Image (tube, rainbow, N blue to C red):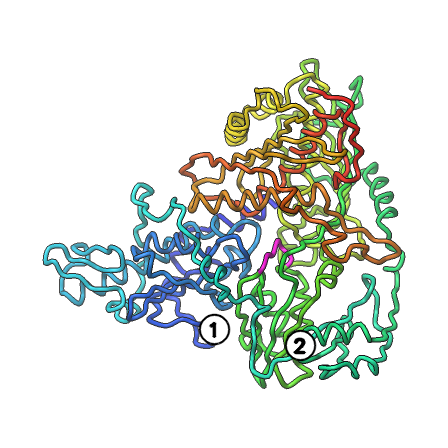
Amino acid sequence: MKRITEQLTRPDRREFIQGSAAVAGGLMLGFRLPARAMAGTDVSGAAVNAFVHVGADDRVTLLIHKAEMGQGVYTALAQLIAEELECDWSQIHVTGAPVAAAYNHPGTSVQFTGGSTSVAASWEPLRIAGAAARTMLVTAAAATWGVPADECRAARGRVLHPASGRAMRYGELAPKAAQLEPPSKPTLKAPGEFRIIGRTLPRLDSRAKTDGTAVFSIDVRRPNQVVAAVAHAPRFGAKLVSFNAEAARERPGVIEVLRVANGVAIVARDSWSALAARDALEVRWDEGSGARLDTEHLRSEFRELAKAPGAIARATGDASAALAVASDPLTAAYELPYLAHAAMEPLNCVVEITDDRCDIWAGTQYQSEDRNAAAKAAGLRADQVHIHTTYMGGGFGRRANPASDYIVEAVEIALQLDRPVQLLWSREDDMQGGWYRPQVCHRVSASLSSDGMPVAWHQVIVSQSVLGGTTFESFGVKDGIDISSVEGAADLPYAVPNLHVELHSPQVPVPVQWWRSVGHSHTAFVVETFIDELAQRAAQDPLDYRRRLLSASPRHLAVLELAAQRSGWDAPALAGQARGIAVHESFGSVVAEVAEVSLVDGRPRVHRVVCAVHCGRAVNPGQVAAQIESGVLYGLSAALYGEITLVDGAVVQRNFDSYRVARLSDAPVIEVHIVPSDDAPTGVGEPGTPPIAPAVANALARLTGVRARRLPLAHVQFDGSKQIG
């Protein structure tokens, strides 16, 4: 994924100024959105450019092209624009942008939110958008006064002419400014001039989410709207044979029963009626080969595959030869399960179709692809489909679904009705609907030199492809290697002279996709626990061992040192506790975490997690800390409990009773420390997740002597009989 992230976050500035369609962040200077793209978008005032609208009342509306799913992106991206625009922060209003080429992700033809790239990819483009708008407003004022533009300056929503003492508000100037030719190369502020970037400003969506006025797609109500629930196949790949809807039609509130591609839809006046009637359906399925799927069988198959040669993802030196002459190589096998995204808000959307138009209200991370898929399903052109991106109650990748499954399903239902429909997936639908983080197996072997340092490292990974068949396949899958499967392993940061990494990508009828931190979610666990085990074999402190192996990686060393210092690594742990450490780079950022862990009734209890992050310049430090905290808790849920299993082709887990996530009683004290940096920002939405599982597992190994090689940790028997280190 690192290569993908690099392609998506390093725009060519010259092409940006020229207005290329592949421009970073999508701003084409002088670009005016067509009326059809803006239809239904709640924006008033003059459009200075695609991102900035200024009202006569001086209200500045910023159209944000990234989805707000709790990560605070509306605020952080607004800070980038507002910094250069020189507007009054109290007059800022944000709204979701429509789907248009101006808002495409850098280097791609799609508009989406993912890969922890929102701020990183927008760092320069949105500042240019703000600077261009400011320059145009200053130019408009200068022309009004008949003075040179360089005698004027902008400050807090006004343009000033200090020599004469005159001033004009942005609201007065916006109509005239909007008619000007945008500057080809607006001047950006020097970092020393920042007054908004780098501050922990309150989130712009906090009030709405507190007083209940924030609109999620589950809140959307259109005139004459109905609600639909779909009976899906009980096993992946099953096909509908027939159904009897007689009993369902007799249930109160039921309006219609419809056949759709993936099952049978109940349309009713409300969600309760739809879900209750669905239970009364009699449905026959051809279950196909999916009925033979079984987690234990897959585990066995994956373990055998991991013993065989795979496609080569990395070959440096000759690991096989070095291992062949090693006197006592260490080999370990690791297993990680399928994981559901388990967002708080289940999947849902509202679709309204007229003769030549389709409107969709959805919390989506994948606006362009959802629009295209909806257009195909509805038999419309893409420009006839209008996505209204609402707030969403968590995404974690699931709402950037490669198949646009729930969107297409809702369109299929709406096509058979003459009224708007809200499709609602129940928690059980969501949990059992597939598109999981893949089940994965790793097999790693290493040998050490006389000084305890690794001489050879051979790693074989078995994982379904995540990028295959998606928009990103063309540059994300090469020579049989899905780079998201090997990220964090093929680019191992540790100085190992002989490194060999291979990949098997088995075809399994369980749909998979990106899950928060993607491949890093499993490679970090394997690499960081194996490194810890090598340190133990070398009889070295795990922190010192990493220091030696990362001597050429200053950012890794910086976070390691900061996390160790703030956690008191060198001080004795409390009685009955042990500390574990892990460091991992993902999405351009490096995060180190120290976990303090004990056993309570034989189960892991995480008391404290100290995090250090190197993410370049922190646009909003408070939000950076919040995202790292969120990533830790999300990863801790998976480490302790997360697991999707199949028996006879059926998913066992249905709801949070059987797919447990971390609760308040599980939550540790979390400290986040940011390494000061003047570098451009890098990702923070996902990098907090990968290190937590290995940090906890390493602490448990020090405490009990038991090395965890399978997740979740609920499968590992810790007897507490032996302490190491």
Q: Residue at x 83, y 69 (%)?
A: 239
Extent of the magenta region: 393-398
Q: Residue at x 84, y 40 (%)?
A: 303
Q: Residue 546 falls in which quadrant of the image? A: top right
* In this rendering, position of residue 426 left or right of residue 563: right
Q: Residue at x 78, y 74 (%)?
A: 278
Q: Is residue 395 magenta?
A: yes
Which corner quadrant holds the C terminus?
A: top right
Amino acid type, residue under disc 1 in the picture: Ala
Q: Nearer the viewer, mark 2 or mark 1?
A: 2
Residue contact between numbered discs 2 and 1, judged by CB atoms under 8 Å: no
Mark 2 — residue? 270
Q: Nearer the viewer, residue 11 or 48?
A: 48
Q: Nearer the viewer, residue 550 or 705?
A: 705
The mark found on residue 37 in the picture is: 1
* In this rendering, position of residue 150 left or right of residue 123: left
Residue 354 placement (x, y as % from top left): 58, 84
Figure check: 562 above or below 92: above
